[in-house]
Image: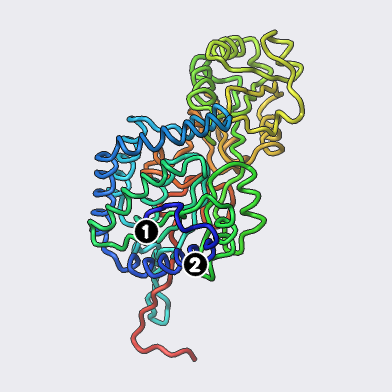
Amino acid sequence: MSATTETVDGKIAEIMTGLGRRARAAAGELARATPEQKTAALTAAAAVIRERQAEILAANARDMAAAKTRGLSGSMLDRLLLDADRVAAMAQGMEEIARLDDPIGQVIAEWDRPNGLEIQRVRVPLGVIGIIYESRPNVTADAGALCLKSGNAVILRGGSESFASSTAIHGCLEQGLTQAGLPAAAIQMVPTKSRDAVGLMLAGLDGCIDVIVPRGGKSLIARVQADARVPVIGHLEGLCHVYIHESADVQMATDIIVNAKMRRTGICGAAETLLIDRAALVTHFPSVIDALSAAGCELRGDAQACAADARIVPATEADWSTEYLDAILSIRVVDGIDAAIAHIERYGSGHTESICAEDPVAVEKFFHDLDSAILLHNASTQFADGGEFGMGAEIGIATGRIHARGPVGAEQLTSFKYLVRGVGQTRP
């Protein structure tokens, strides 16, 4: 059933229960689907997205007009915006997911016991996944594709600001499923903007939802973590750091921090804090600040940073724990790598951190001592992305330590079961 707002008012619970039941039935069919069927559905959906580009962009134009009227921030508008390149990227991402090895049925481990039992640990789908996200309509395609590849049925609840765009994209996914002979209910979209639907999903839809994946801002994540009655795969804010060690190559470090902050300021992998060694103030800082200022970045720093360059305004304590999602960067001067690590441990969200350094000892210490989901050496934090990791796409970056961590792709949307083969063994 494609998403519409008709007949929804007063019937939200009934509609949501119906979604859950259809998803549960579809999950059983998907678990038995062949890799070839899933690949065919993904490939067909990608083709439909390309064919319906004008329809998708027209829907997005309606969303954008409404969002501007509501006064959404520049970063939110950037997340919402679709253009020809972003539509093409959605289709390409689905094709890349289609080409990945099918995770279902993969043998993760196997061993024999002294009594002759042969044991295998094998990947299986999670079942039915509920995904709640905000303004990025491309999540509709990414999430639907990843859930399909991993054999899971999915119920998508996009943000109200992207409703028209997501609806248009969802119609393409449904057509791809139908062309491949798979149930359209394998990928469903909540047909209402009402927040009541979110509450019903968090309650599990009478046992039909197996796991919730939120993707959005701090308030959404907080609500999901507080109210969910089913397991959650989620992430906190993207409080990402770039640390410039005194051994860093000056031009490389400059290029990395500018890209990490300014390539796209509204994504969770954008750097929010720069940490720089006091020993690098004379050698590295001028180049870095010149480049950031030229790129249009507002700079907020501690006393040492402000003293080093008049273009930097004083930072407050709140700046160290703020996910700006904008062209704003906080800067702290640190006395070596231990101080940098201590700052990240205190203020970071466990998302992504990068070290710019040529000293291998410093790099290994950074990698060993920090426990964020993604750690990079001499590379931009904006590589914190499932597509860049070769996963085709991602549902989000998980910062927890249970089940999935880092980019959540198809493989991370699976569980496992044990297959034990014997020849008549009985336990004494």
Q: Which mark is residue 170?
A: none
Q: Residue 247: which quarter of the image?
A: top right
Q: Which mark is residue 1?
A: 1
Circle 2 SS class: helix
- Which residue occupies 70% across, 10% down? 308
Spatial distance from mark 1 to mark 2, Cα to Cα?
A: 14 Å
Structural crowding at the residue carrying mark 2, measured as other residues with C-alpha within 10 Å and reported as few (<14), some (14–19) or many (≥20): some
Please indicate whether residue 177 sits to the left or right of residue 188 in the image: left
Which quadrant, please, contains the N terminus? bottom left
Q: Amino acid at mark 2?
A: Thr
- x and y percent of residue 177 in the render? 29, 56
- x and y percent of residue 380 in the render? 49, 28
Please indicate whether residue 184 sits to the left or right of residue 335 in the image: left
Q: Which residue is mark 2?
A: 17
- x and y percent of residue 271 in the render? 57, 29
Which of 95/309 is in front?
95
Q: How many marks?
A: 2
Q: Amino acid at mark 1?
A: Met
**Pointer 1 or 2: first along the chain:** 1
- Which residue occupies 71% across, 35% down? 342
Label 1 close to label 2 by CB (< 8 Å): no
Establish if 166 lies above or below 231. Answer: above
Structural crowding at the residue carrying mark 1, measured as other residues with C-alpha within 10 Å and reported as few (<14), some (14–19) or many (≥20): some
- Which residue occupies 58% across, 47% down? 235
Circle 1 SS class: loop
